[in-house]
Amino acid sequence: MALPRVIATDLDGTLLGRTGEVSERNRRALNTAIEAGIRVVIVTARPPRTTTAIASLFECAAVVCGNGAHTRLPGRDPLVRAIDRQTSQVLVDELRSSLPEVGFGVETGTDFYHESGYYLEPWVPPGWVAGVLDDTDALLAAADPVTKLLARSRDTPVHVMHEAAVASVGSLAEVTYSGKGGLLELSAFGVNKGSTLALLCQEWGVPREEVVAFGDMPNDRSALTWAGTGYAMESGHPELLDPALGLRVAPSSFEDGVGRVVEELLERG
């Protein structure tokens, strides 16, 4: 295939290795692609505050955070695609009904808030939490905009949560997940990695056929299937490795899979 004009990559489980860092091979391959005139886009579920150091390793054309809800472009204000206040309240009420044990958190694009019933992983630094609110009414009043609504359970498997949430609120929001723990991620309806990548490429005049995307989890599916060539990581979620989805398979994130594929693309181009 000819050289792509855009390479979009997820971070955790895709570009990052076991230590949570970008390997030298991956860094070198992407920087070589940039030197060849290819736009590199980071497309992650992470909030902006945890992507800055990684994005600084490359001259990124864009950094898409929060599954597409918060996008940073050089020299411009962030593109924010948030859930409105009324819909946020409906989502909380409906999820409380279908998943009574969940606690809620909110990413605003700059800060993270959660209600007191939300289980916070022990490894999360206290400085990442802007506020702990007594209940969801207080949470939604304090956290604005709602770029990503998080629903966490300590006991229910995430795939079970996902099925219940899609049935109850799938017509109101994008519902996905990017890990094995009981954590659902909700964004505004129609806002996902794929739709945001499509918006950027439309602005740049790049057709989907000239886009290559890498990912490993269900929240990457929209980007992988929109791109002309989507690569699921060999170490990724079984859903993405289903041959019926039509994705290519890149070597594991632990084996510099992104870098190896990019090297091949550059050699063939």
Image (cartoon, helix red, strand yellow):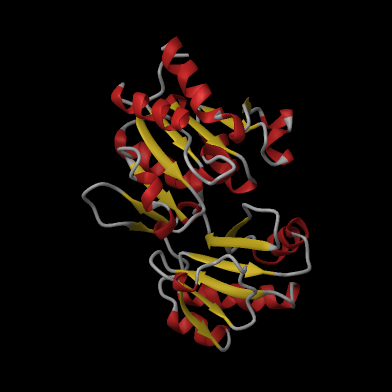
Q: What residue do we see at 56% from left, 28% from top? A: 257
Image: 166 above or below 114: above
Q: Position of residue 129 (x, y in %)?
A: 47, 74
Query: Seen in the image, is 58 located left or right of residue 102?
Result: left
Query: Seen in the image, is 28 located left or right of residue 15?
Result: left
Q: What residue do we see at 51% from left, 51% from top? A: 192
Q: Position of residue 208 (x, y in %)?
A: 45, 30
Query: Seen in the image, is 194 located left or right of residue 49?
Result: right
Q: Position of residue 158 (x, y in %)?
A: 73, 59
Query: Seen in the image, is 107 located left or right of residue 242?
Result: left
Residue pushed farthest top? 268
Between 88 and 63, the one lying in front of the other is: 63
Between 17 and 72, the one lying in front of the other is: 17
Q: Quadrant of residue 134?
A: bottom right
Q: Quadrant of residue 40?
A: top left
Image: 128 above or below 75: below
Q: What residue do we see at 40% from left, 57% from top? A: 48
